[in-house]
Image: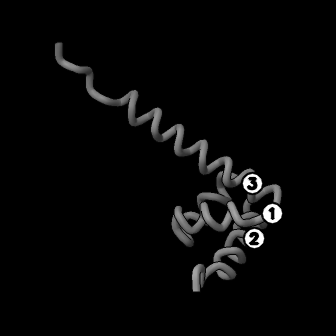
Amino acid sequence: MKYPNGLAHTLAAYTALAEHPHIDDAVDALVQEIGWDAAFATLAGMEEVRASMGLYSMVCGLFIADANATTQQPPRER
């Protein structure tokens, strides 16, 4: 079976999206419940508008984390 927990993850995603009015809170709750990779794959496979918004939120979070990581490096010695 390629994705054995797919139904459970999809139900968890619908639950998180229904329980949290703010999309970032819903994504955070889903990631805590099923993990980042599974949350990304689940939201990507859904056709709900809020799932697309959640996926967008996750991708933006990657760019923000990357920007923070590159701007917080110590200065180079000359």
- Compared to residue 2, the image places residue 36 above or below, namely above
Q: Residues within 10 Å of mark 2 (few under 14, many from 20)?
A: some
- Compared to residue 29, the image places residue 77 above or below, namely above
Q: Residue at x 64, y 58 (%)?
A: 27
Q: CA distance from mark 1 to mark 3?
A: 7 Å
Please give the label number shown on residue 47: 1
The residue under label 2 is 14
The residue under label 3 is 52
> Looking at the image, is mark 3 or mark 2 nearer the viewer?
3
> Looking at the image, is mark 2 or mark 1 nearer the viewer?
1
Circles 1, 3 touching at the beta carbon (< 8 Å): no
Q: Residue at x 81, y 63 (%)?
A: 47
Outermost top residue: 78
Q: Secondary structure at mark 2?
A: helix
Displayed quadrant of residue 43 = bottom right
Q: Earlier in the sequence, mark 3 or mark 2?
A: 2
Q: Position of residue 35 (x, y in %)?
A: 52, 67
Amino acid marked by disc 1: Glu
Along the line of sight, the residue nearer the viewer: 54 or 22: 54
- The C terminus lies in quadrant: top left
Q: CA distance from mark 2 to mark 1?
A: 11 Å
Colour scheme in use = one colour
Q: Position of residue 52 (x, y in %)?
A: 75, 54
Please give the label number shown on residue 22: none
Amino acid marked by disc 2: Tyr
Circles 2, 1 touching at the beta carbon (< 8 Å): no
Q: Secondary structure at mark 3?
A: helix
Taking 17 as reference, is 4 left or right? Answer: left
Q: Earlier in the sequence, mark 1 or mark 3?
A: 1
Q: Earlier in the sequence, mark 2 or mark 1?
A: 2
Amino acid marked by disc 3: Ser
